[in-house]
Image (cartoon, grey):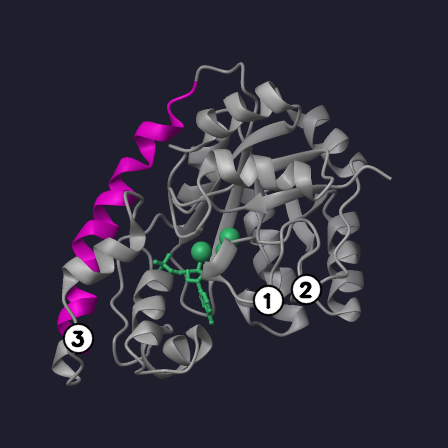
């Protein structure tokens, strides 16, 4: 069976592999196609596509938008046909600026907590890509302040944590609209992070469907079998595409490997065929 991965980060956002490296790694892992879905940026997509064309991997252009949400975490994936002239990259600049404003404030909060940390150290970890919370987490591990990245999030960086700083985000409606206006297919990422009980989750998803949501990420390393079955039911009810991916971040997300997640993820190529049928 041909396998794919539709949720992949590079060092353009908070992954540790460059766009070229992740494409080479996908070939090594025997994958047929991957989608690049960096947070709030599409700057790595063409580079990955170029490398894919060169060495024989299908690369899909994507993005992952962190939307405004009062419950858990809401991420919307967007998948785009290559041949469309769209304005999506430019629309993401406002989100990249919001990150740039937020990041020094996280440093200030960590300093106020008595941690010796400088913004330059975070920049060094991130390299030339945009900075995200995993880079702060990695630095806290390197400094020996926490034992691993999970602890860094739990103790400091998670939503509502002592070093958490909010940033400007698109609303769910705006996120979906921006993707659609630019000829993309909006898909709800890892629905378990929404953190609502089943009845409330259905209502939320119905609201998103009314805004134009077209898919739901069912196959995801953290989803239990029960959750996957429930999300498939939701997909049928609202006529949503089913997608899947590992959310690979390289070294910046421990225990998650490209294509296979924690080891048992399998996303068949037919999922990408169905997605491509919706490209307009
Ligand atoms: P940001 O977009 O900069 O606010 O950072 C959010 C990102 O942090 C998410 O997209 C995840 O990639 C990452 N993240 C969240 N929780 C954890 C965790 N416990 N360990 C590692 N990475 C995490
Ligand atoms: Fe991330
Ligand atoms: Fe996400
Ligand atoms: Zn992701």
> What quarter of the picture does the N terminus occupy?
top right
Compared across the picture, whether 61 is left or right of 38 comes to right
Residue located beneath label 2 in the image: 262
* Residues at discs 2 and 3 in contact (Cβ within 8 Å): no
As rendered, which of 35 and 56 lies closer to the eye? Answer: 56
**Which residue is rendered at x = 58% and y = 46% of the image?**
7
**Which residue is rendered at x = 57% and y = 22% of the image?**
81
Q: Position of residue 204 (x, y in %)?
A: 57, 59
The part of the chain drawn in magenta is 86-110
Compared across the picture, whether 81 is left or right of 133 comes to right
> Are there few (<14), some (14-19), or many (20+) residues within 10 Å of tag 2?
some
Who comes first in sequence, dot 1 or dot 2?
Answer: 1
Cα gap from disc 3 to disc 1, whole angstroms? 29 Å
Residue located beneath label 3 in the image: 109
Badge 2 element: loop
Residue located beneath label 1 in the image: 255
Badge 3 element: helix
Q: Is residue 90 magenta?
A: yes
* Residues at discs 1 and 2 in contact (Cβ within 8 Å): yes
């Amino acid at each position: 069976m041909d396998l794919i991965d539709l949720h992949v980060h590079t060092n353009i956002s908070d992954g540790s592999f460059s766009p070229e490296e992740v494409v080479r790694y996908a070939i090594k892992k025997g994958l047929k196609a991957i989608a690049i879905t960096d947070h709030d940026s599409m700057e790595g997509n063409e580079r990955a596509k170029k490398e894919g064309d060169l060495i024989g991997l299908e690369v899909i252009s994507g993005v992952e938008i962190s939307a405004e949400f009062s419950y858990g975490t809401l991420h919307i994936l967007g998948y785009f046909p290559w041949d469309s002239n769209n304005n999506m990259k430019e629309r993401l600049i406002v989100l990249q600026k919001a990150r740039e404003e937020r990041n020094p404030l996280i440093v200030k909060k960590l300093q106020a907590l008595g941690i010796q940390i400088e913004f330059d150290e975070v920049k060094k970890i991130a390299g030339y890509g945009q900075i995200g919370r995993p880079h702060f987490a990695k630095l806290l591990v390197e400094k020996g302040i926490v034992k691993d990245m999970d602890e860094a999030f739990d103790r400091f960086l998670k939503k509502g944590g002592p070093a958490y700083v909010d940033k400007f985000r698109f609303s769910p409606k705006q996120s979906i609209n921006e993707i659609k206006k630019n000829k993309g297919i909006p898909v709800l990422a890892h629905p378990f992070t929404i953190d609502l009980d089943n009845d409330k989750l259905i209502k939320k998803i119905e609201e998103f469907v009314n805004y134009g949501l077209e898919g739901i990420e069912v196959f995801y390393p953290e989803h239990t079998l029960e959750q996957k079955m429930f999300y498939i039911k939701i997909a049928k009810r609202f006529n949503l595409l089913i997608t899947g991916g590992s959310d690979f971040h390289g070294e910046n997300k421990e225990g998650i490997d490209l294509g296979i997640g924690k080891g048992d993820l399998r996303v068949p190529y037919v999922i990408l065929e169905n997605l491509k049928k919706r490209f307009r």
